[in-house]
Amino acid sequence: MADIPQLLRLINGYASEGIMLPRTEFEISENLRDFSVIHCGELVVGCAALHIYTPTMGEVRSLAVDAAFHGSGAGRMLMDALEAEAQSFGLQSLFAFTYIPAFFAKFGYTEIEREAVPLKAWKDCLRCAKFQCCDEIAVIKHLNVEHSRVSDTHMEGVATFPQVLPEDPVLLPSIRKSH
């Protein structure tokens, strides 16, 4: 629960720019187990959530990396962790709604029609200011289910960035499940 204020800062910072859906403290609390975070010391510098909709399909949600850490590999680290988690649950595909489809394309996602995702995913859309004129792009990735029983020990805070960040070479960011 200690991560909630920092998750709100990251997510709602981008929401204020109109590029993410804002989240409330209640929504984050309710879905905290979905989140993985990148932290550097005590600071949460990135987050993403894996929200499961069906036994075979999940959504990448609330992917945000602090601007000071853009280009550091934090986004890749989060995407890799969510994909490994999805495979450990036996999911066959992941989708996302995004304004940056090129980022997702780097990870093997392709653009699809929004109608191709489960109807449950639209529940968040109902409260969005852009509901009547949504300009987000739906993307999907079909997972390699042969490797679907990946251990979740990768989420225990042991993975680190491949590079030392110049802002503070003493602190190496790592990823873990949110708590």
Image (cartoon, rainbow, N blue to C red):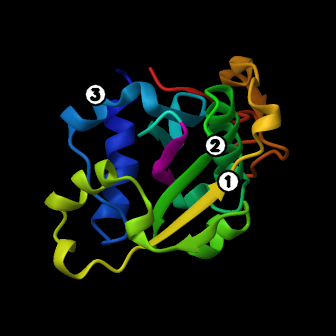
Find residue 6 and report its image quarter. Answer: top left
Q: Could you classify mark 2 by the number of other residues whose Cα lies within 10 Å: few (under 14), some (14-19), or many (20 or more)?
A: some
Q: Which residue is mark 2?
A: 92
Residue type (three-letter) at the residue carrying disc 3: Ser
Where is residue 126? Give x, y as percent. Answer: 16, 60
Predominant SS along the magenta part: strand
Which numbered mark, 3 or 2, is in the foreground of this view? Answer: 2
Q: Quadrant of the N terminus?
A: top left
Residue 15 among magenta residues = no
Residue type (three-letter) at the residue carrying disc 1: His
Q: Which residue is mark 3?
A: 29
Residue at the (75%, 19%) spot, across then down = 151
Residue at the (68%, 69%) spot, across then down = 105
Residue 57 among magenta residues = yes
Left or right of residue 49: residue 150: right
The stretch in magenta equals 56-64
Where is residue 30? Give x, y as percent. Answer: 27, 28
Q: Which residue is mark 1?
A: 142
Which numbered mark, 1 or 3, is in the foreground of this view? Answer: 1
Say what secondary structure mark 1 lies in. Answer: strand
Say what secondary structure mark 2 lies in. Answer: loop
| Contact between labelled residues 2 and 1, with CB atoms less than 8 Å apart | yes
